[in-house]
């Protein structure tokens, strides 16, 4: 089925092929890779300038950023290495059924509690995360691009492809590649990307609480995202039946998106509020919280029905 879909796409109109295979990959690679660093600058109240070479060093990270990113990756991999319950995903067209480690909620809960303990022991850690956000995103960008390069080389080695090189880099070559014994998509999508989302939310909320301004709006945002993310990790095995896992291949679009774009964009409002505090009243915050919880419950119900 996968080969037939690829052949059908390649036999489409010349204009469609040019846009899909030649235009979109390089444009998206340049646009979104740069956008995360621009968001990092905007969130701290700085106006990014393409000619501001004095800020370019930040894409290489700093000591704190590399330690933070390296620990996050290693911690996520450890939880995929430890013995535990296995969930077997739906079969591929070739009949392969990928195995996943079914300890998502425990990983989420332990990681969140560990971060909160670390915050109490080292009160400056959240502010360090906030101040090093451009460097953290730079580290994540470098790691994600290296991973995508490995996925491209390894995927093309295993399976011949007629697609352009940049398209395979962007779209991916394999459905279920594994790295150091871990399913790549479970590692990048669930365990690193979404866990970083939660940690960054807690860190930015903590900094805003310390600043003492805009706490009502920040608290509502942090609570709703925490509820949503805890719901996701409770439902993680259901995610393995979705199109992200069963249809999308592991490449820049999916893996870079979860490793870099999710921590950058999905936390941006709280990140931005540290410098530009929310003016939301307590009453409006309470109403927003109730409506938000209702929306999360609806989302959870939809996810449940998809199973």
Image (cartoon, rainbow, N blue to C red):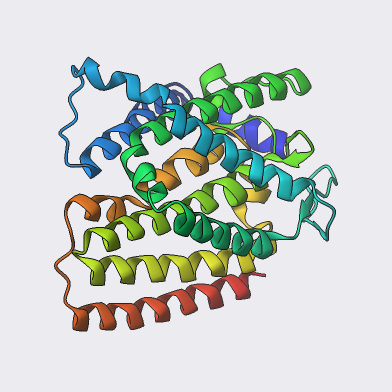
Query: Where is 183 relative to 102, above or below?
Result: above
Give the x, y percent position of residue 7: 65, 30
The total of numbered circles placed on residues is: 0
Q: Nearer the viewer, residue 184 or 230?
A: 230
Could you say which is closer to the camera, residue 45 or residue 13? 45
229 or 23: nearer the viewer: 229
Q: Quadrant of residue 279?
A: bottom left
Identified at 39% across, 29% down, the residue is: 33
Report if residue 198 is visible in the image. Answer: no
Location of the N terminus (image quadrant): top right
Q: Position of residue 292 (x, y in %)?
A: 36, 76
Relative to the observer, which residue lies in front, 48 or 150? 48
Horizontal relation, residue 227 to residue 204: left or right: right
User: Relative to 265, does residue 250 appear above or below in the rendering?
Assistant: above
Q: Residue at x 51, y 44 (%)?
A: 258
Q: Residue 244, relative to residue 284: is it above or below? A: above
Q: Residue 188 location, x and y as percent?
A: 60, 42
Please provide percent x and percent y for residue 264: 38, 44
Residue 126 visible within the image: yes
């Amino acid at each position: 089925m996968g080969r037939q879909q690829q052949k059908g796409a390649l036999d489409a109109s010349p204009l469609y092929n040019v846009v899909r295979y030649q235009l979109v990959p390089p444009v998206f690679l340049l646009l979104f890779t740069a956008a995360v660093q621009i968001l990092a600058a905007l969130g701290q109240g700085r106006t990014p300038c393409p000619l501001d070479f004095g800020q370019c060093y930040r894409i290489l990270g700093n000591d704190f950023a590399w330690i933070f990113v390296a620990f996050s990756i290693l911690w996520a991999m450890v939880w995929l290495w430890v013995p535990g319950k296995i969930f077997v995903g739906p079969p591929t067209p070739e009949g392969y059924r990928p195995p996943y480690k079914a300890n998502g909620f425990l990983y989420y809960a332990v990681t969140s509690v560990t971060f909160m303990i670390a915050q109490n022991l080292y009160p400056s850690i959240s502010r360090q995360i906030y101040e090093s956000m451009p460097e953290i995103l730079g580290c994540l960008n470098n790691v994600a691009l290296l991973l995508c390069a490995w996925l491209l080389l390894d995927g093309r080695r295993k399976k011949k492809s007629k697609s352009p090189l940049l398209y395979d880099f962007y779209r991916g070559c394999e459905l279920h590649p594994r790295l150091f014994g871990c399913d790549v998509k479970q590692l990048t999508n669930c365990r690193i990307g979404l866990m970083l989302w939660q940690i960054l939310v807690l860190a930015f909320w903590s900094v805003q609480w310390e600043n003492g301004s805009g706490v009502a709006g920040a608290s509502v945002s942090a609570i709703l995202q925490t509820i949503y993310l805890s719901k996701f990790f409770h439902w993680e095995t259901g995610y393995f039946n979705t199109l992200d896992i069963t249809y999308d291949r592991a490449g820049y679009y999916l893996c870079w998106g979860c490793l870099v774009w999710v921590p950058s964009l999905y936390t941006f409002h709280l990140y931005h509020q540290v410098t530009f505090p929310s003016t939301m009243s307590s009453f409006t915050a309470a109403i927003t919280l109730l409506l938000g919880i209702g929306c999360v419950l609806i989302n959870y119900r939809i996810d449940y029905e998809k199973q």
